[in-house]
């Protein structure tokens, strides 16, 4: 799967995408086409990005992570010869080298079975938290980030990424709470929903709790106003 600007190959460490020369907008468009054409090939995978001397900002790297996230792919590393790109990569909490095999799962935190865990940081694009119990996050969940829990998910911040609660025996009894509930996708057990229209349209924002009622996900006030 090769072009002048985008080269994608599978390795034992996951997918490696090399970005060549060219306008950034054209590269992003071409990458989007590749991801769309081979959606089943990429789904569930992890990507290491090689950009050579290209200078990229945190916003540009986040846009890559968001694009990958739309195709169920996570970005775990960006390798570059450009110091500014390396700094942006570090700021997003991503790995700066593709050579460290142990880093493949560095941003997919799978913890031993337990009742709950507390994550005291913001999850950025490409970062994934998976836990068999309840998950509490003190911080935001940005677009392109994912939280998957066997139990409930409590976010003391903004939920703008993907949240999937009730993966375990709790099932439909799980809840998802956030100070701002605006996920790219929200799942509880086998039920799927997205952000309420008023949240997406810039209306009033207040803490909400999502739960399953009558076989569908509904949202209600989490904290009394």
Image (cartoon, rainbow, N blue to C red):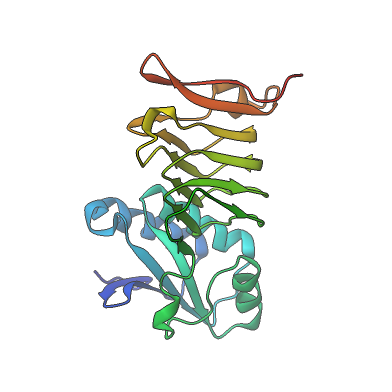
x%, y% of residue 41?
23, 58
In the image: residue 102, left or right of residue 119: left
x%, y% of residue 193?
43, 28
Q: Quadrant of the C terminus?
A: top right
In the image: residue 199, left or right of residue 161: right
Which residue occupies 47% across, 57% down?
128
x%, y% of residue 144?
50, 51
Q: Residue furthest front?
A: 114
In this picture, is 179 found above or below 47? above
Task: Depth check: give the residue in front, 144 or 85.
Answer: 144
Task: Depth check: give the residue in front, 104 or 115.
Answer: 115
Which residue occupies 66% across, 77% down?
84
Q: Residue furthest top?
A: 214
Q: How many marks?
A: 0
Image quadrant where residue 164 sits: top left
In this picture, is 23 found above or below 141? below
Which residue occupies 66% across, 57% down?
121
Image quadrant where residue 187 sits: top left
Which residue occupies 54% across, 79% down?
96
x%, y% of residue 25?
50, 58
Q: Quadrant of the N terminus?
A: bottom left
Q: Residue furthest right?
A: 225
């Amino acid at each position: 799967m090769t072009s002048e600007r985008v080269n994608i190959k599978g390795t034992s460490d996951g997918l490696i995408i090399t970005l060549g020369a060219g306008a950034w907008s054209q590269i992003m468009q071409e990458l989007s086409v590749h991801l769309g054409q081979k959606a089943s090939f990429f789904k569930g995978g992890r990507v290491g990005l090689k950009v050579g001397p290209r200078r990229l900002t945190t916003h540009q790297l986040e846009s890559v992570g968001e694009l990958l996230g739309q195709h169920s792919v996570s970005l775990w590393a960006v390798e570059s010869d450009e110091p500014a790109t390396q700094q942006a990569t570090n700021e997003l909490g991503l790995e700066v080298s593709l050579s460290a095999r142990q880093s493949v799962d560095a941003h997919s935190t799978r913890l031993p079975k337990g009742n709950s865990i507390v994550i005291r940081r913001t999850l950025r694009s490409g970062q994934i938290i998976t836990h068999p119990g309840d998950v509490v996050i003190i911080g935001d969940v940005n677009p392109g980030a994912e939280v998957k829990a066997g139990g409930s998910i409590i976010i003391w911040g903004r939920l703008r990424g993907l949240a999937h609660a009730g993966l375990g025996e709790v099932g439909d009894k799980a809840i998802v709470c956030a100070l701002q509930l605006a996920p790219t996708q929200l799942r509880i057990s086998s039920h799927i929903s997205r952000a309420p229209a008023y949240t997406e349209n810039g209306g009033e924002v207040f803490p909400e709790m999502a739960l399953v009622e009558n076989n569908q996900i509904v949202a209600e006030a989490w904290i009394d106003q």
